[in-house]
Image (tube, rainbow, N blue to C red):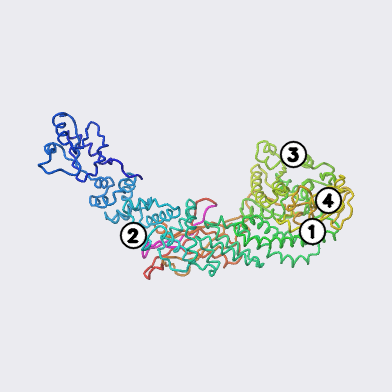
Amino acid sequence: MGDRDMLDENIQAKLADACAEARIVFWEDVSGEFAQDVRELDLPGVTVVDVHGCALATKRRVLRDERDGNFLLYRAGGAPCIEEDFLLDVKMLARPFSATQSASWAEDTGLPIEAARIVSAHAAFFASKERRAALRELVERADWMRGGYSDDGLVFSLLSVCCGSKAIHKVDAVRDMAARALEQYAKGTDDLMHLLERCGLTDAYWKAFSTGLGYRSETPGLEDFAFEVMLSACSDLTGEVPTLSPDATIVISDMANDSRKSDVFTDLVDATCDYVTSKCNLEALPTEVLAGHRYLPVVDNVIIRRIANDVTQGVDCSSQIVEVRARRASGRFFSKWGCAYDALIGAAGVLARVPRFESEVGSVDDVRTCFDRYVSDWSAIDESYRTFGLVASKAVLLMADVFEPLAHQVELSYAHYSNRLSAAWQRLVVERGSWPVDWEGFAQRRFFEDRVLTELASKRVAVVVSDALRYEAGSDWSRRVADRGKCQVECTAMLASLPTYTQLGMASLLPNQTLSIDPKTLNAAVDGSDATGSQHREQILRREVPDAAVLSYEGLFDQEGVGRLEGTKLAYVYHNVIDMTGDKRDSEELTFAAVDETFGQLDRACARLFQLGFSCVFVVSDHGFLYQRDSKSFDFVEVPFLGVAVGTDNAKQSRRFVVANDLPTCDALIEFGAPELGLSGDFTCGFPKGTRRMRLSGSGARFVHGGMTLQEAVVPCVRLTRGKARGSAAPVGVDLLTGGTKVITGSFVRFEIFQTEPVGDGVLPVSLQVGLYDADGQLRSETKPIEAASSSRSAEERRIPVTLAVAQDVANGARLTLRVNQRYGTTSKYKTVAQAEYIVRRNFGLDF
């Protein structure tokens, strides 16, 4: 808002009216405040004359030379004594005019005449037309002006306008002023303070903070105020009684909740964090208290270090980390620290489960039991490792001293698990004498016969084949889909054909009686027909289903691809993100990110297929994969004859297997003939023992498949059908636990949110917002976001303690409603799911 640079419109209008009624208007400006403005005044048809120094000439001009002209005669400083006033006779003939700027401004803003003193004292404020307009609108509506005019009320209104507040309730205006002060400090600007100083309002500003917020200082200033506000907001950590009223905490809470002020809030916290932290003994506070705090990001640092110490000692604290993560997820700084919590969840899953696995695996004495235990229990270790690996690099960058040693420990533990599991599994397979290809319902090569044909009897069926989607990943994705409750989901496991590579895995998912591979090219054949590529696979499918169609994932979303599916009974859709990423040395480190990307694309593919009229969708895979982040955690195997055999085109190899018509025996390999693998032909396959890799020029070694490990060989079969699942997913219920008495006696109200059941198995987490409201629906406290996302089966662990700061101006005896509002999905809309009535009884004093 700029200051005035000419006469305001109100005075100009009055001058125009006066000049329209009289030929001569005489303006005696005693104060001389308009001397500069008059020189630039333009009144149509009127000659404006400043008579200073030209009194006689003006008199001659007006009375003799231009008798018919219209004049505005202006004299600054007041009239001289009568004996020296050469214009006295002209003045007697003229219409007198007088004006003061303060009176004009008061009239323009609708203020009474008694406001003139305040207007004059704060002239710089009224010099702005925009500020006057804002003031005019405010004084008509503000609750502090309803009892009639007062100097204090007007000054408070001036402050409110300067701070850009449009609030009509005084308590809200004070909060707006405080928020503006904090924003100015956070941004390192002093525009507001300069404006207040220019308008003569600085003392009134700090007085308003003293009265409204309890802020008192011998040297008040933005920095001092910001530090006091943050100290009061962090009283749960300092243990000190807040020096400011709860309204100061409400200001901070509102700022933390407002995504539009994210940068300002972050800058404010950065500027005050060190000092406030120095007043806290964070190490002495329980994790539950720290987890409930919202303002200091250093809290996350303390929590993470504390939990990491337990994780490194093998404490099974995954559920605790999930609970803490859920409570921290609604905080402003979670985007920074979320990767650390996820890394801890993954690390805890590995380090706590591997010892249990070690105690169990020795008692497994047949392949089917080993397979079942892997599917039901041990594959969770692979999922935890993937969870850790997905965010480990970010976590190390965030807290290297914590996550570098933790990552090393996780790698060692996972390598031990992988080696121990592969040794046990391979021993059992060798003892069996063949690869288990005859498991009805569990063998990959029986997928079409056991699953697809059954569904085709009554449904249109689509099969999405996602390359290298291993079992734990498919199981994880299926749980996420099931939790959304939009379709019926069932996930089972299949044992892939061996070797576990793309061509054979893809062939195994087709209708087949016999499978074979060419040792020279590794191309696969079904019943003697080439099964390489989409065209050949479509031909094989059409032997069973004449109108079957094959297309890529991308084809689902273009007109040509959709046209090929019209009316088809069966569709195979091929998707490739994980294998394409992991198989390249330059991108294999992104394998786990590719799994996450795959989840999103599978969601989209299934939704599209349902949209196109398919009522049953299978998501399956050709093979899994083994991935170890640290190349030092696995070994390479030396096969002396391998280079010669491959060089003469008598063999074909990958990192994890070799195929040859005549493969010499080697102690480093486990060897099976084609019949022992359920394949047609006269060749031998060799597989490195354990998780070891064979050397292969030009390819990466961290991501591998083709071998015998369960990570490579167990793949998902996820069946999805249209319609909501029985007992489909619903938001978790919450109750409000308020204790015996519902009386507010101080500045805070404390209660608990109880999550009625664990999240998972069709029970969805919910985002809540809690606050106190009066009978008019006005918010009378801070609001806090709460995430009800606990998966714990312990009822005690699903209790969420909450403390709200109550507005200072709430009257004694007032009735307030505590509302728990639940958000609709990811929208900004809420509904009330629980509430309780409180009465305010502050007779015994405030607790601040």
Disc nearest the viewer among 2 and 4: 2
Find disc 1 in the rendering and name its residue. Answer: 690
Residue receiving disc 4: 658
From which residue to which does the magenta span run?
A: 804-825
Counting residues from the start of the chain, the first of labels 2 and 1 encountered is 2
Q: Judging from the image, what secondary structure is the residue with disc 3 in?
A: loop
| Label 3–label 4 contact, CB within 8 A | no
Label ID, residue 547: 3
Inspect the image, locate mark 2, and give the three-letter code of the amino acid beneath it.
Answer: Lys
User: Is residue 194 placed above or below 376 in the rendered structure?
Assistant: above
Q: Which of the marked residues, 3 or 4, is nearer the chain's N terminus?
A: 3
Q: Are marks 2 and 1 in contact (CB under 8 Å)?
A: no
Residue farthest to the front, as pictured: 53
Alpha carbon separation for disc pair 3 and 1 = 44 Å
Q: In this view, does 175 lie to the left or right of 75?
A: right
Provide residue 5's location: percent of width, then percent of height: 31, 41
- Cβ atoms under marks 2 and 4 closer than 8 Å: no
**Residues at marks 2 and 4, CA–CA distance in whole angstroms:** 84 Å
- In the figure, residue 375 lies in which quadrant? bottom right
Expressed as whole percent of the image width and height from the top left, the position of residue 476 reads 67, 55
Q: Label 3 amino acid?
A: Asp
Q: Does label 3 or label 1 sit earlier along the sequence? A: 3
Q: Residues within 10 Å of mark 4 (few under 14, many from 20)?
A: many
- Name the foreground residue: 845 vs 214: 214
* 10 Å crowding of disc 1: few (<14), some (14-19), many (20+): many
Residue 362 is tagged as none
On the picture, is 141 further left or further right than 744?
left
Tell me the element at label 2: helix
